[in-house]
Structures are given as C-alpha cells and as structure tokens.
Amino acid sequence: MPHVLAIHCAINLTPTSSSEVELLQGMLTIPSLSRQESVLAHYLVEQAQLMGLHAYVDEAGNFVASTHQQLTDVQPIVLLGHMDTVPGNIPVRLEDGILHGRGAVDAKGPLAAFICAAARTARSKEVVRPIVVIGAVEEEAATSRGARFAVQQYQPYACVIGEPSGSQAVTIGYKGRLLVDGYCLRSLSHTAGPLQSSNEIAVAFWERVRCHASEWNEQHAGNSAFASLQPSLRSINSGQDGLEEWTRFTIGYRLPPDYDIIALRSQLEQWAYEDDIHISFSGEEIAYQSTRTTSLARAFIAALRATGVKTTFKNKTGTSDMNVVGPVWGQNIVAYGPGDSRLDHTPQEHIRITEYTHAIDVLELVLRELQGAQEQRTR
C-alpha cells in the first residue's frame, strides 16, 4: 500500500503528548460499570471538545465525538469502542511506563486511542470523510444497548471496533454466544432414598451439554478453538425451604461460525423437557468474521508496516460489538486496540504506554489512508 507508506515518509506522525496519556489515566479513575457510564460519558465530551472534536451524549447514553458538526453525504468512518467495564477496583497508577487500572485493556485503552487518533487527524485539516468515535454503553452486558442504537444511526464506509488486539495485530472475527438459564424444582426427599436431588439433575444436564459439545467438536472443529463449540457452567446455586428444593444454573455457549443455533436451542429444550427443567435463553449473538482483503484491513497492513511491524490477524473466542454491527454494516470492519487481551477482566489489568502510543500512531495512519479511499464499501 504505497499511499500510506508515502504519507509516513513525507510527514512525521503527530508526537505523542502527555495529554494523550493523561486522557486514558483520567478515564481509568472514573468507575463505569454497565448501566453506570454517564459520568465517564460527560467527562469524555468535555475532553473531546478540548481536543477540537464535536462531542455529545446520544439518546442511548453513548459518548459520540466527530470531526464534523453534522454528517455529510460522504460515508463516515466509525470507531466503535465501549465505556463500560466489569466490576473490580484496581488502583490507578503509572509506574515504569505501565498504566494500571480497571479498563486499561478492556476497553478504555482502545477508546482513548480512538479519540486521540481522530483528534490528530482532525488537526491535519485533511478530513473529507467524517470520523465518528463512539463510546458505547452496555457492551459488557448481554444487551449491547449502545451498539444496537448506533447501528441504526450510521451507514459507515468502514468500522473499527475498539477491543484489545495488541497494537501489532488486527482482529477479524468473533465467536457467537448463547446464554442458558435453568431452574430445577423438586419435592424434598430423604438423602438415603433413590430419588435424584435437584442438584444432581442440574449437574446431569450440564454433563449432557458438555459431552454433546465434545462429540460435536471431534467431528467438526479439529484443533481450532475458533471453530469449536464451547459451553461453560457459569454459575450454579441451590436452596430449600423444608418442603421443596431448587437449583438454578447458567450455561454460556461460545458458538463457531455458521453454527445452527436454532437446532441447539431445540436440543436443549428437549433435554430440559425430559428432565423436567425449566430453561430460558438470552444474549444470543451469531459469530461474525471479516477478511484480511478489505480496504480497511489493507490500510492496517500498510500502516503497521510503516511503523516497522508485520501484521498478525486474529480470530477471538469471545464476543464484541462486531457481532452486533457487522451483519448490518458489512465486511469492511475489524477490531483493533492496544492491550493484552489475556489481562481482560483480571486483577492484573494494565497497559504499556509504548503500546498505547503505538496504537494511536497506527490509527492515525489508517484514518489518513481512508480519507483518500474512493472504493465502494465492501458488503
């Protein structure tokens, strides 16, 4: 991709400023659990406006910042991150070039990089194609309310999802998801008797689920985690009142591409009927996978090469807002962001400042390249 390389050689990238690091550090000091993102959203509006972007909080509670006060007829580039984090207080501190804090990786680091790269590009005065940065609400919840609102508001030329891929890699696929809540109620019986307890029935159901997935994977998945059917027993608890006993459990599925979710639900309902278990479904998302041949993926390849890096493409076994917007917005979509995803949701969550600033540089090059792209959006 000579265009990006030419840009890189002709001009210097915007030097990293202390304010770009301070932006992320400030974000980490503001707790923002799912459905509690408002304080962070308004903070980001103030910061984005100071950086020269037009910013507001939309009807869903999303933070939105744009290079243009109003969208034009030119399809925008959407940088879709999220503001919410999982629970867990990690004291915010910057030591030896490493910034610690809940959300440093998932996904305030990527969102901060989006804002900084968009602001840099806006200052270059080369923005013909609008750039819209969105900090969505409720990505960590099964609702994905922010992304579901945003997908109705825009029809972008390209979309980058803000999730940690590592600054030297690009993610092009996420598995699907299905959550199964179960409830088993039985009359109490003596533990010396022959009747199964509600706990035993629930555990037997889980074992059925696990064996079914193992058999399916042997036939279809090989050694590929991305192609496998992955159930997990997320929770199980029980109680009794002296007359009846009950067990509640939740099973989470990670689903491979092109998996028949309808058939899976039917099979689970049949097993539940046989065992007299009540089940319900939620959080359903189909797997979504792009390719490395889109104009957006090629722009990342060239941008990373311009910074001395050979691109690695990844498929992730989790889900992201790509599962929500990808089927509507099309194939010109990737996920990108600084941070080691193995630190997601862990007590050790932290990000290296050098990686954070490298990601901003890469995104700046990508955004400038896409300003000159005239191809029709890949569908």
Image (tube, rainbow, N blue to C red):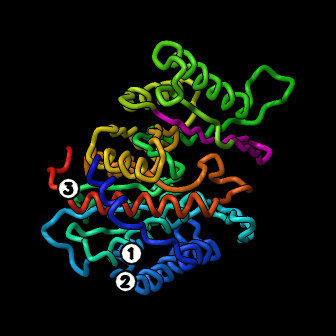
Residue 74 image position (x, y, % from top left): 15, 65
Give the labeled residue for mark 3. Answer: 373
Residue at x 72%, y 44% (from the top left corner)? 237
**Which of the 4 image quadrants contains residue 339?**
bottom right
Q: Along the line of sight, which residue is nearer the eye, 205 or 16?
A: 16
- Per the image, the residue denoted by label 1 is 119
Residue sticking out furthest to the right: 192
Residue at point 72%, 41% (across, down): 244
Q: Which residues are magenta?
A: 236-255
Q: CA distance from mark 3 to mark 2?
A: 24 Å
Q: Is residue 86 above or below residue 41?
A: above
Could you tell which of marks 3 and 2 lies nearer the N-terminus?
A: 2
Which x, y percent locates residue 191? 84, 28
What residue does disc 2 label? 52
Looking at this view, is 159 or 273 the one in front? 159
Quadrant containing the C terminus in the rendered view: top left
Q: Give the amino acid type for the residue marked by disc 2 in the picture.
A: Gly
Depth check, front residue: 177 or 100: 100
Q: Cβ–Cβ below 8 Å for labels 1 and 3?
A: no
Residue 241 visible? yes
N-terminal of the pair, mark 2 or mark 1, is 2
User: Is residue 246 magenta-colored?
Assistant: yes
Characterize the local packing of mark 2: few (<14), some (14-19) or many (20 or more) Cα atoms within 10 angstroms.
some
Graded by Cα atoms within 10 Å as few (under 14), some (14 to 19) or many (20 or more), the crowding at tag 1 reads many
Three-letter amino acid code at disc 3?
Ala
Query: Badges 3 and 2: C-beta atoms under 8 Å apart?
Result: no
Is residue 256 depicted above or below 117 in this figure? above
Q: Is residue 263 above or below residue 340?
A: above
Between disc 1 and disc 3, whose residue precedes? 1
Give the secondary structure at mark 3.
Answer: loop
SS for dot 1 = helix
